[in-house]
Amino acid sequence: MANQPSSYPILSTSFNQDNSCFAIGTREGFKIFDCNTGRLLYERAAGAFIIVEMLFSSSLLAIVGAGEQPSLSPRRLCMFNTMTGVALNDLNFLTSILAVRMNKKRLIVILQEKTFIYDINSLKILDTIDTVPNPKGLCAFSPSLDGSYLALPASTTKGSLLVYNVSDLRLHCEIDAHRAPLSVLTLSSGGTHIATASEQGTMIRVHLVSDATKSYSFRRGTYTSNIFSLSFAPAAELPDILLATSSSGSVHIFSLGSLPNQRSSGLLASIIPIPHTVSDALDPAQHCILHRAVPAGVRSNTVIRKIEKFDDTATPEHVSLRATISMITYGGYFLEYVYNVNHQNKSSWTLEREFNLLTAEASSLS
């Protein structure tokens, strides 16, 4: 997530592909943190950066300057080695870079009207995709090599998207998800499902990537809101839950699959693909909200970092599902919440950690 308003002290935020680390870009440079400990792993004061992307927990970064210094053009992508502190390669483009995504085989570069696919080892260009105008750099990319998909907006007037198989370099499918233009989209870690929200922000839809069919449709609320983040729980197949954050400052959790203690006849098990009708409204039993997780209007990037499932008596509090949720605010804070669901399907939230990213030092958070 990049290209934020100038009022924010943080210009970009990103989690790595397995959510074990995260990076922030500021006007002074960039920093990398360990999600598990909160420890500052690396920092470099070298000017303003609007994109800082990691390749898992390796020393390879893809970084793009904000253009505030002559040497940090937003049209230049630098592949940077944090171990040596040396730039490995530069890729230059005619227009500003809006997003960058990577896995262990592919490098994806998003411009406003073009998307480039590279072999990440040789940096050989493999394909160029002409796209509709995409000024926000909207995209979703699965890090899985088995389901390596890239999703891009297909229209500027409605919420349709194109899904590409970047391993085979071919168009996989087109999905009509919303009537209004897209505002955010994300793929599950295994590349099996894609979640989308439109600029209206009232409905969130989940589609099965394999055949482009709609699996779930959730109502976030009745009033328009900007959706900042969508995140699936880590899973090879169907994730258990989906998270959404919005400009209201709330965090929303939607259930996708049965919890460990649920019977097959339960309400969750009865959810089936449904059309764009009044039945899109979500039963409250499948929608949990943490109000005022951050101040309203403060932009955030949030992921479900970890999920654990238990038998009814495996934990003293009889927790059946526990999700660890990590949130980076563009105001400069890291927050970590734990979301618990007990054997009676009652949920609770706990704020486990919070610290200032801008004042963090290498030895202060270990």
Image (tube, rainbow, N blue to C red):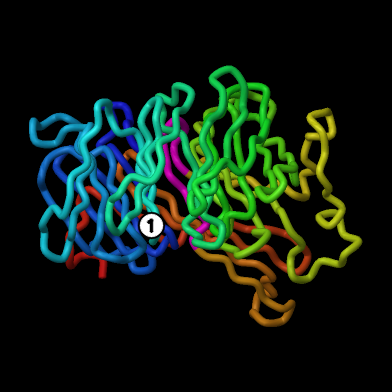
Q: Which of 269 and 350 is in front in this view?
A: 269
Picture quadrant of residue 12: top left
- Residue 84: image location, x then y, percent: 11, 64
Q: Can residue 248 be seen in this view?
A: no
Neighbour class for label 1 at 10 Å: few (<14), some, many (≥20)? Answer: many
**Image quadrant occupied by the C terminus:** bottom left
The residue carrying mark 1 is: 16
The mark tally for this picture is 1
Mark yes or no: residue 237 visible. Answer: yes
Residue type of the residue flagged with mark 1: Asn
Q: In this view, does 308 lie above or below 208?
A: below
Say if 310 sits above or below 121 in the image: below
Residue displayed at 65% across by 55% down: 241
Nearer to us in this view, 284 or 64: 64
365 within the magenta span: no
Return the x and y of residue 308 as percentages of the image width and height. 60, 71
- Please name the residue shown 52% across and 35% down the image: 184
Q: Magenta residues, as a range?
A: 294-305
Q: Horizontally, is 96 left or right of 266 in the view?
A: left
- Residue 112: x %, y % from top left: 38, 26
